[in-house]
């Protein structure tokens, strides 16, 4: 569970509600003054409608489901991955590359398994690199597309808020003969802009940023694997492979490499 997303949502709601209550403390207003169903419909509904128009339906569904990733991102353990690669390098060094087929058959990570099987099949190193980097590139492109979808929603929401404001202003100007109605109508007209800004800056832009951050971590994780697989295929010393791959990690994470027993034993 990604607690940052949950904490951010809770804190945002608390700050918004409390600020409204503090602001309204000197008058007769309250949170209820900021709740207006027609405004919610035009801003939220209009933004979602724009989202449907902007992408194909299947991409809309994929992007909608991606919100769950911000709460439960994939579990990535670079240190464990490096240990696994070092173990594979030791196996290849002692028993030959063909011995990796048995290890690959038990792998849960399909990306690593695919690369190892390409090596076992005797695929040219440049072709292995090209295939794995192509998969990485398309993965990054898919992730970027989902993040861009939410960034687009962040631009649609304030625009729909302005549309709602203009509708409210039209209704207000139509009935200027009643001065007492101007204030409430103006408040309703502006509430849609408020909703648009909340959706854009409290939901859509943060979701897009979190998805890009998660994607960046995953691409780096896969890049470490690619570099490790190419090093195994090149027959490099497992100790050298370990040190090379540790350079991808932040210094604070490097101490975890080898802690699980993977290490670089047998690399003589």
Image: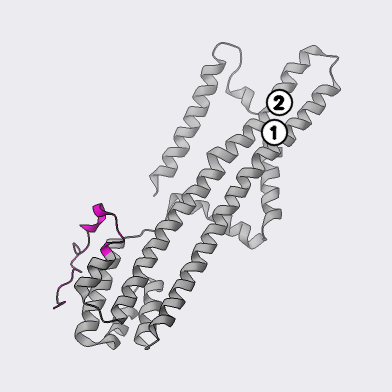
Residue 206 drawn above or below residue 56: above
Residue 229 drawn above or below residue 212: below
Please provide the residue range marked out in magenta: 246-268
Mark 1 Cα within 10 Å, few/some/many (few <14, many 20+)?
many
Q: Measuring 52% from the left and 26% from the top, which residue is drawn there?
A: 17
Q: Measuring 24% from the left and 87% from the top, which residue is drawn there?
A: 96
Q: Measuring 28% from the left and 66% from the top, which residue is drawn there?
A: 245
Q: Position of residue 73 (x, y in %)?
A: 42, 55
For marks 2 and 1, give the CA distance.
8 Å
Observer-nearest of 168 and 125 = 125
- Residue under label 1: 39
Q: Measuring 44% from the left and 33% from the top, which residue is drawn there?
A: 11
Marks 2 & 1, CB-CB < 8 Å contact: yes
In the structure shown, which secondary structural element does the residue marked by tag 2 occupy? helix
The dot on residue 105 is none
Instruction: Give the dominant element type of the magenta stretch: helix, strand or loop.
Output: loop
Residue 174 drawn above or below residue 142: above
Residue 14 highlighted magenta (yes or no)? no
Quadrant in which residue 84 is drawn:
bottom left
In the structure shown, which secondary structural element does the residue marked by tag 1 occupy? helix
The dot on residue 188 is 2
228 relative to 262 in the view: left or right: right
């Amino acid at each position: 569970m990604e607690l940052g997303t949950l904490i951010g949502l809770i804190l945002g709601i608390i700050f918004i509600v409390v600020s409204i209550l503090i602001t309204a403390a000197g008058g007769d207003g309250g949170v209820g003054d900021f709740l207006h169903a027609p405004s919610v419909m035009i801003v939220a509904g209009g933004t979602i409608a724009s989202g449907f128009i902007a992408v194909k339906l299947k991409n809309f569904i994929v992007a909608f489901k991606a919100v769950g990733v911000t709460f439960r991102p994939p579990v990535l353990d670079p240190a464990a991955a490096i240990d696994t690669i070092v173990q594979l390098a030791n196996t290849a060094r002692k028993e030959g590359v063909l011995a990796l087929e048995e290890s690959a058959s038990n792998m849960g990570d399909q990306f690593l398994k695919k690369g190892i099987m390409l090596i076992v099949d005797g695929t040219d190193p440049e072709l292995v690199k090209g295939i794995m980097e192509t998969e990485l590139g398309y993965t990054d492109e898919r992730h970027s597309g989902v993040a861009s979808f939410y960034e687009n929603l962040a631009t649609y929401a304030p625009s729909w808020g302005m549309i709602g404001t203009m509708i409210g202003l039209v209704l207000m100007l139509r009935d200027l003969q009643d001065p007492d109605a101007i204030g409430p109508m103006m408040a309703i007209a502006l509430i849609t802009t408020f909703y648009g800004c909340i959706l854009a800056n409290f939901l859509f832009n943060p979701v897009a940023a979190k998805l890009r951050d998660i994607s960046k971590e995953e691409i780096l994780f896969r890049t470490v694997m690619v570099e490790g697989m190419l090093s195994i295929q090149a027959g490099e010393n497992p100790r050298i492979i370990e040190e090379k791959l540790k350079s991808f990690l932040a210094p604070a994470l490097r101490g975890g490499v080898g802690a699980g027993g993977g290490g670089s034993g047998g690399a003589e």
